Image: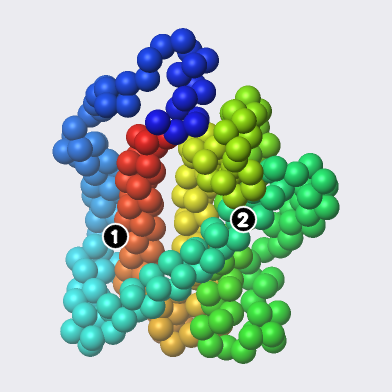
Amino acid sequence: MSVVETDRTQASGTKAAPGRARPSGPSWIGAILAGMVLPVLLLLLWQWASTNGTFSASQLPTPASVFEALLELIERGTFWGHVAISVQRVLTGFAIGASLGILIGSLVGLSPRTSRFLSPTIQALRAVPSLAWVPLLVLWMGIYEGPKVTLVAIGAFFPVFTTVASGFMHADRKLIEVGRAYGLKGHRLVTGILLPSAAPTVFAGLRLGLAQSWLFVVAAELIASSKGLGFLLIDSQNTSRTDILLLSIICLAVLGKTTDFILATIERRTLRWV
């Protein structure tokens, strides 16, 4: 049993039961069916709007046309390359940005002096729009992968930093005292006490950071890219391929939801042990 569980058990005066079954939610099949209702309705609305004469075929292609565009890109052998490079950029930038967010957020959350020194500047930088970083990163790092991954890392950093710092600032001081009584200091105190107690807040920040990474990757792929869903989005606009443009948007939405689902699954399994 961890120090956090020991303290909570002693505070409640009851014996902990780590193996006790928790109430189960709705079945995963029911959850999937419920989640599919709105997408199906939107698909029907899209089909209706694209065929009733309100929009031309160049303005709003039918779902079938978008699916044909997908098959076209797959036959060319370019679709999976665009998907793979965007996923790589997002995951690499997210890993860097989230790690820095947890590290610096921990320092700010634990030390009021560090918070007074760092927080004003970090909060000011947070207000800078993503596209404002592009020319500076190109000037510093060139036009290859460096600035693209860095821009995604910037997008991931701020939500993680903010939530981790807030979670640590509002951590139960009694738990910290218990940890110190057990001889925990420094990183052992953070990993043994603070991270478990603030785990829900930390995971909320990670999920926000991951969502922000997908937003920033589109801006990142404006930097002299020849591959990626962001590039595909801009290229389809320039070539008036609205079907590919819509396909790019749908792919970004599906990939964003898929990665969020994976992180949410990790969150649920991790919180069972906290």
Q: Nearer the viewer, residue 135 or 181?
A: 181
Q: Amino acid at mark 1?
A: Ser
Q: Earlier in the sequence, mark 1 or mark 2?
A: 1
**Residue 103 numbered tag:** 2
Q: Which quadrant of the rendered structure holds the N terminus?
A: top left
Q: Quadrant of residue 101?
A: bottom right
Left or right for 30, reference 13? left
Q: Is residue 15 above or below residue 137?
A: above
Categorize mark 1 by other alpha carbons within 10 Å: few (<14), some (14-19), many (20+): some
Can residue 69 be seen?
yes
Residue 245 x/y as whole percent:
38, 72
Q: Residue at x 33, y 74 (%)?
A: 83
Q: Nearer the viewer, mark 1 or mark 2?
A: 2
Residue 233 in the image, given as x and y percentages of width and height: 43, 74
At label 2, which amino acid type do we have? Leu
Quarter of the figure with the C terminus:
top left
Decide which of 214, 56 is in the foreground and name it: 214
Q: Residue at x 67, y 63 (%)?
A: 129
Residue under label 1: 50
Q: Secondary structure at mark 1?
A: helix
* Dots 1, 2 in contact, CB < 8 A: no
**Which picture quadrant has residue 267?**
top left
Q: Quadrant of residue 236?
A: bottom left
Q: Which residue corresponds to the image point at 53% horizontal and 74% vertical from the top-left?
A: 149
What colouring method underlies this structural image? rainbow
